[in-house]
Amino acid sequence: MNIRNISTSPFPDQKPGTSGLRKAVTVFQQPHYLENFIQSIFDTIGDFQGQTLILGGDGRYYNRQAIQIILKMAAANGVGRVKVGIGGIMSTPATSCVIRKYNAFGGIILSASHNPGGPEGDFGVKYNTSNGGPAPEKVTAAIFERSKLIDHYKILEAPDVNLDTLSESKLGDMVVEVIDSVQDYEKLMESLFDFERIRELLSSGNFRMCMDSLHAVTGPYAHNLFEQRLGAPRGTVINGTPLEDFGGGHPDPNLVYAHELVKILFGEAAPDFGAASDGDGDRNMILGRKFFVTPSDSLAVITANATLVPGYQDGLAGVARSMPTSQAADRVAADLGIDCYETPTGWKFFGNLLDANKATVCGEESFGTGSNHIREKDGLWAVLFWLNILAVKQKSVEQLLQEHWYKYGRNYYSRHDYEAIDSERANQLLANLYTQIPTLKGKKLGNYEVEYSDDFSYTDPVDGSISENQGIRIGFTDGSRIVYRLSGTGTQGATLRIYLESYEPDTSKQNLEPQQNLADLITIANEVAQVRTFTNMEKPTVIT
Ligand code: G1P
Ligand code: ZN
């Protein structure tokens, strides 16, 4: 066995963002770039000698090459066993499931989530710890510190491993097991949902669904679950074959990028239910016939109806949402008498709440929903949750939402993104907002009066860790909010996100188009931050 010790020098830009290290493929392809980061992980995560690691990715361009490199580095660094997904593919939620199920030391997920793939697209690396969740900030910070000092990495000289058959082989002293995580994932879903009832719904002939996997990682899982296991007709899953470039698309389940699904659900003879998931399978979008469910509302509906689902029939310990997510779930939590936690953006902040059983379900406005069954958000879990609710309630998606708003009021919601703006200008925009924070309280902006304005800071109720500078909030006396923050996942320049929310308890005013309802707040948000001046842009690049 020939372990090589390769000299290297640090790259200054290996700071993990909201969700791992994400860069253009061409950046990762630089000699030593991937290797440096992987060695920095190995140098940071503690004593894994002889232990099991899970490895997989969303199948995007460079996935296969990266897996071969990481396997050889794992062997050289003393890992005992690596369970790797067949074809190098494993969704983010399935990886979390497998880490937990097999008591692995941790896992490495190769994905840039919803960012486009291909030679010109993005690539990414995430490290998850033994609870199955994204490494917390103290671990990602330590990995970054290590990456700034690294001067060598270890790699085994060995032929590539065959990733395309279920098998077990040796790479040096390390065992490489090629696994099919679809089975493990299906078993977990079956333990949570009423498959009998969902099967009745999907095979009844009276209910049609369309699941768009956007040529990304959930294809094999979705075919297996919906068409093979739950009796939906073949063709229910569209774009179900993972492709290295996602068919040239943008694997992000929203109204803009999942346009094929949107056309079907808003077209003639539309199905009853539509869903899509992202590159690595942790996001979801839920649609009814000619009807869009905002992710914030989806979290609220799931919370309100959780006891209809076997895995949650005893009720929820609590619910958690990221700060910019609408406050719809808060109203349900208050009604149920359970706690509602507000965390910074990013799934890693939910881990402690789930581990400590303070929250059972969690959600983000960015099309992320999940629960304590794993430690990642889970796209297909959300789809199954909705199907289970619909199977029990025997109502349409739209009816369900109408009834929900009738009971709790409607939180109108939208996010405006200004992508790829000059980083310096973006920072100036924020700096200008910071100076205004102390002056806004009590001010009238249009018809709204500012109740508070701050830079969101979070103290983790479990370990006391503090995360500052998590977004600027302007809250109004009627419960409306404007939130500004910069993206931590973009790879080009800066992306400004403006989150807008208003609350409407009056049932006669709950059926407006969100942009129309939010028009005044949008104007205020643009004026306060002088968005046009700083971004040089007339309008957002993406509205969700
Ligand atoms: C975005 C979303 C955030 C999500 C993350 C990873 O991060 O806004 O909610 O957790 O992707 O999927 P951002 O680019 O805003 O930092
Ligand atoms: Zn994702």
Image: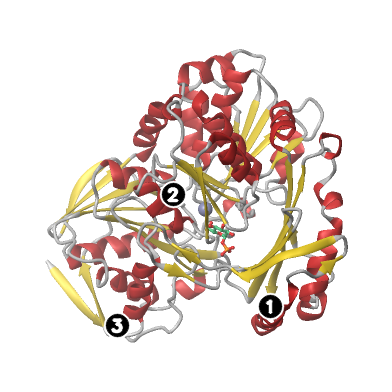
Residue 479: image location, x then y, percent: 72, 53
Q: Against 8, is 88 above or below?
A: above
Sequence-wise, the earlier of marks 1 and 2 is 2
Residue 504: image location, x then y, percent: 78, 44
Between 54 and 463, the residue placed more toward the observer is: 463
Question: Which residue: 51% across, 60% down?
Answer: 112
Residue 413 is marked as none
Q: From the Cβ of disc 3, is ligand 1 less than 8 Å away?
A: no
Residue 470, quarter of the rendered image: bottom right
Q: Determine whether the residue tagged by mark 3 lies in a helix, strand or loop.
A: loop
Question: Which residue: 78% across, 33% down?
Answer: 290
What amino acid does circle 1 point to? Pro
Residue 437: image location, x then y, percent: 69, 76
Q: CA distance from mark 1 to mark 3?
A: 43 Å
Q: Which residue is mark 2?
A: 376
Q: Determine whether the residue tagged by mark 2 lies in a helix, strand or loop.
A: loop
Q: Which residue is mark 3?
A: 150
What amino acid does circle 3 point to? Ile
Residue 138: image location, x then y, percent: 36, 69
Residue 243 lies left or right of residue 400; in this view the side is left
Residue 438 is marked as 1
- Let me know if residue 242 appears in the view: no
Q: Against 202, is 150 above or below?
A: below
Q: CA distance from mark 3 to mark 2?
A: 30 Å
Residue 93, quarter of the rendered image: top left
Q: Residues within 10 Å of mark 1 (few under 14, many from 20)?
A: few
Q: Residues within 10 Å of mark 2 (few under 14, many from 20)?
A: many
Q: Against 460, is 213 above or below?
A: above
